[in-house]
Image: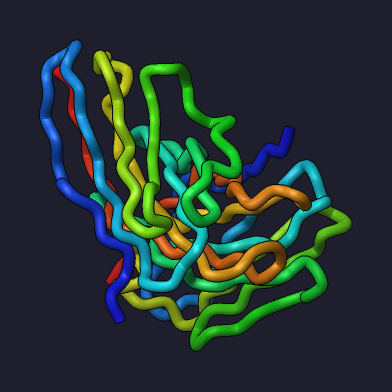
């Protein structure tokens, strides 16, 4: 079946602009996660949705970052007033279960470059 | 705060050899441990998930072990092939939390 998809695959923007990154999870997966990966590092958690609500947004670095999942499926990560330090690969993951069985499946990522 | 460490950062071995990748974590109150593979410029592919009550999991030439009390996991790759070249990452969710804390990965190169 189809895996997690993310669009766009690459996004180049100028400092100060607004960007939206989209994630389509695996069909039927109730949980959706956003992570950010800088070069040479492991992914870092940003936000986690269970259904439509954000169950944990403790990883969002500041109030320029916001994410929504209005119908419990597709999610959009929104970054306002982008800064050069926001440049990274933004990864989305989804899972069907919680706790010990919570296997997360990742999309290919969106590479964001802020000039 | 959970910290995950993977040593070495890079490893090169000749094709056909068996090898072990290491992962350690500081807080043993975890739900499970997941191993991923990441090819350059790509997303993460889930390889194995070991639940906290399990000691090991196997998938083909891969075998992952978990010693929760000592905060360690190993990923054993048998009969390595050039196609195994990638970065391998381990990650854990702390008990009561679904978010993953990742190590920085081991970049594996299999020499033909």
Question: For the point 37% across and 72% down, which residue is it?
Answer: A27
Question: For the point 18% across and 28% down, which residue is it?
Answer: A113
Q: Quadrant of residue A86?
A: top left
Horizontal and vertical percent position of residue A90: 33, 41
- The answer to whether any part of residue A88 appears in the image is yes
> In this rendering, is residue B57 above or below A12?
below
- In this image, A87 relative to A95: left or right? left
Screen quadrant of the N terminus of chain A = bottom left
Of residue B15 and residue A102, the one placed in the foreground of this image is A102
- In this image, B10 relative to B4: left or right? left
Horizontal and vertical percent position of residue B8: 55, 47
Screen quadrant of the C terminus of chain A = top left
Of residue B26 and residue B12, the one placed in the foreground of this image is B26
Question: For the point 60% across and 70% down, which residue is it?
Answer: B49
- In this image, A23 relative to B21: left or right? left
Q: Residue furthest right?
A: B69
Q: Quadrant of residue A73?
A: bottom left
């Amino acid at each position: 079946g189809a895996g997690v998809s993310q669009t766009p695959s690459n996004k180049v923007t100028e400092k100060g602009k607004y960007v939206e990154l989209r994630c389509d999870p695996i069909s039927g997966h109730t949980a959706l996660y956003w992570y950010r990966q800088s070069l040479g590092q492991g992914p870092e958690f940003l936000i986690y949705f269970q259904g439509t609500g954000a169950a944990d947004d403790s990883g969002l670095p500041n109030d320029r970052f916001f994410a929504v999942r209005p119908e419990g499926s597709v999610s959009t990560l929104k970054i306002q007033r982008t800064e050069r330090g926001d440049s990274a690969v933004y990864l989305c993951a989804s899972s069907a279960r919680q706790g010990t069985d919570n296997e997360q499946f990742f999309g290919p990522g969106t590479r964001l470059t802020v000039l | 705060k959970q910290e995950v460490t993977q040593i070495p950062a890079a490893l090169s071995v000749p094709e056909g050899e068996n090898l072990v990748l290491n992962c350690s974590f500081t807080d043993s109150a975890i739900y499970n441990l997941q191993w991923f593979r990441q090819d350059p410029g790509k997303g993460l592919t889930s390889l194995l998930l070991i639940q906290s009550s399990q000691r090991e999991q196997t998938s083909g030439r891969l075998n992952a072990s978990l010693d929760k009390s000592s905060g360690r996991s190993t990923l054993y790759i048998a009969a390595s092939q050039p196609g195994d070249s990638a970065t391998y990452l381990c990650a854990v969710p702390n008990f009561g939390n679904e978010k993953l804390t990742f190590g920085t990965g081991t970049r594996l190169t299999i020499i033909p």
